[in-house]
Image: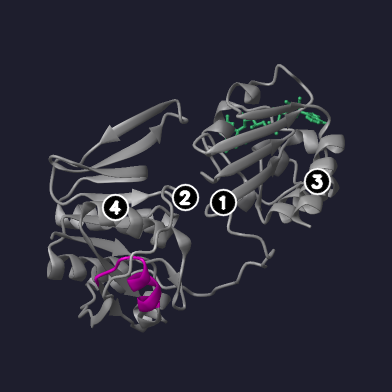
Amino acid sequence: MAEVLVYVDHLDGAVRKPTLELLTLARRVGEPVAVALGSGAEATAPALAEHGAVKVLTADAPEFADYLVVPKVDALQAAYDAVSPVAVLVPSSAEGKEIAARLAVRIGSGIITDAIDLEVGDEGPVATQSVFAAAYTTKSRVSKGTPVITVKPNSAAVEAAPAAGAVEALAVSFSEKATGTRVTSRTPRESTGRPELTEAAIVVSGGRGVNGAENFALIEALADSLGAAVGASRAAVDAGWYPHASQVGQTGKSVSPQLYIASGISGAIQHRAGMQTSKTIVAINKDAEAPIFDLVDYGVVGDLFEVVPQLTEEVTTRKG
Ligand SMILES: Cc1cc2nc3c(=O)[nH]c(=O)nc-3n(C[C@H](O)[C@H](O)[C@H](O)COP(=O)(O)OP(=O)(O)OC[C@H]3O[C@@H](n4cnc5c(N)ncnc54)[C@H](O)[C@@H]3O)c2cc1C
């Protein structure tokens, strides 16, 4: 059976959920061969094998941590040359998209970014994308070279499908460009203890209606009762009530959780662009005419200062 390369996103050997989702999609196209790079690469093998990787190609070198993406592109290209896959799948993070784009240029292939689904067509994998501020859903396939496809988090369910997951060392020789941009320092982000916004299964967001940084505690309390990440509209971010890293929308992050709860957010097109592919959307807004109600599955017309605490209390009670 044809092999599909899957680029692994991991932290010191702990495989992140979007990669496991990618393995689910990869199995539709062929036999997944995972490529894990950097510190802890070999430690990824059990999780990858559990989710269908027939092989795990690993490489570690200081270059992966000390320089920006080019060493990783060199390694992915080495894996591509070794395997001759029918497709290359990469998680749709900012770094993933850069790696994928550089690889596509090098191997002369077409690229599809931010796919939300993948199926097998007669002439290769067909990717579904949500485009133009999620106003259209398109299906497309790469018509030149080996398809390179980046897939958004939460696009598929993680499914166990045990496979061999045989670890093989990948020989990588770094190109001249690999050491062009050195990482000079790193500052770990302060952990909130909440899931990563783009990967979270549930996102609770607040907008201008939250009316102040201090009131975001209400949004955080609801998020914590659900084990959710916290998002914000640009109006809330621009007002300085919540960090920019939490902005959802066209100029913020794009999220696609199972459940998105918008509180005090009107539903401007630029906000919708970042959340419209969420599976279930709930909005709380005191204006029954707010455009957000056009796209919700459940809408609550009411004052968020009354509704959100009640919701938090109810969730907490039901959790027992
Ligand atoms: C180029 C460009 C890029 C942009 N990128 C983004 C982006 O990435 N993300 C983004 O979000 N926006 C973006 N915007 C801004 C966007 O156009 C809107 O201005 C913004 O989304 C509005 O945020 P909001 O819904 O919080 O505020 P508003 O539109 O002011 O809506 C606030 C809502 O809260 C409701 N409300 C008020 N008080 C309460 C209460 N007590 N209880 C319940 N409801 C209440 C109101 O009825 C209203 O519907 C962008 C704009 C441009 C031009």
Q: Is residue 266 left or right of residue 31?
A: right
Q: Does the residue labelled 4 lie within 8 Å of ligand 1?
A: no
Q: Distance between the residues labelled 1 and 2?
A: 7 Å
Residue placed under numbered mark 1 in the picture: 201
The C terminus lies in quadrant:
bottom right
Q: Do the residues labelled 1 and 2 touch (CB within 8 Å)?
A: yes
Residue 109 among magenta residues: no
Cα separation between marks 4 and 1? 27 Å
Label 3 crowd bin: few (<14), some (14–19), many (20+), radius 10 Å: some
156 up-or-down from 250: above or below: below
Residue 13 figure quarter: bottom left
Whole-number angstrom distance, CA of label 4 to CA of label 3: 46 Å
Mark 4 or 2: in front is: 2
Q: Which of marks 2 and 3 is nearer the N terminus?
A: 2
Q: Which of 263 and 72 is in front in this view?
A: 263
Residue identifier under label 3:
314
Q: Position of residue 274 (x, y in %)?
A: 53, 38
Q: Are marks 2 and 3 in contact (CB under 8 Å)?
A: no
Residue matched to label 2 = 154
User: From the image, which quarter does the N terminus lie in?
Assistant: bottom left
Can you say whether 164 is above or below 152 in the image? below
The secondary element bearing badge 1 is classed as: loop
Above/below status of 140 relative to 155: above
Q: Specify few, some or many for label 1: CA neighbours under 10 Å numbering under 14, 14-19, or 20 or more.
A: many
Q: In terms of sequence position, does the residue under pointer 4 or pointer 2 come before the other?
A: 4
Q: Tell me the residue that label 4 is attached to.
A: 101
Stretch in magenta: 44-54
Q: Is the magenta stretch mostly helix, strand or loop?
A: helix
> In the displayed structure, would residue 263 be above or below residue 113?
above
Query: Tag 2's secondary structure?
Result: loop
Q: How crowded is mark 2: few (under 14 residues within 10 Å), some or many (20 or more)?
A: many
The residue lying furthest to the top in this view is 289
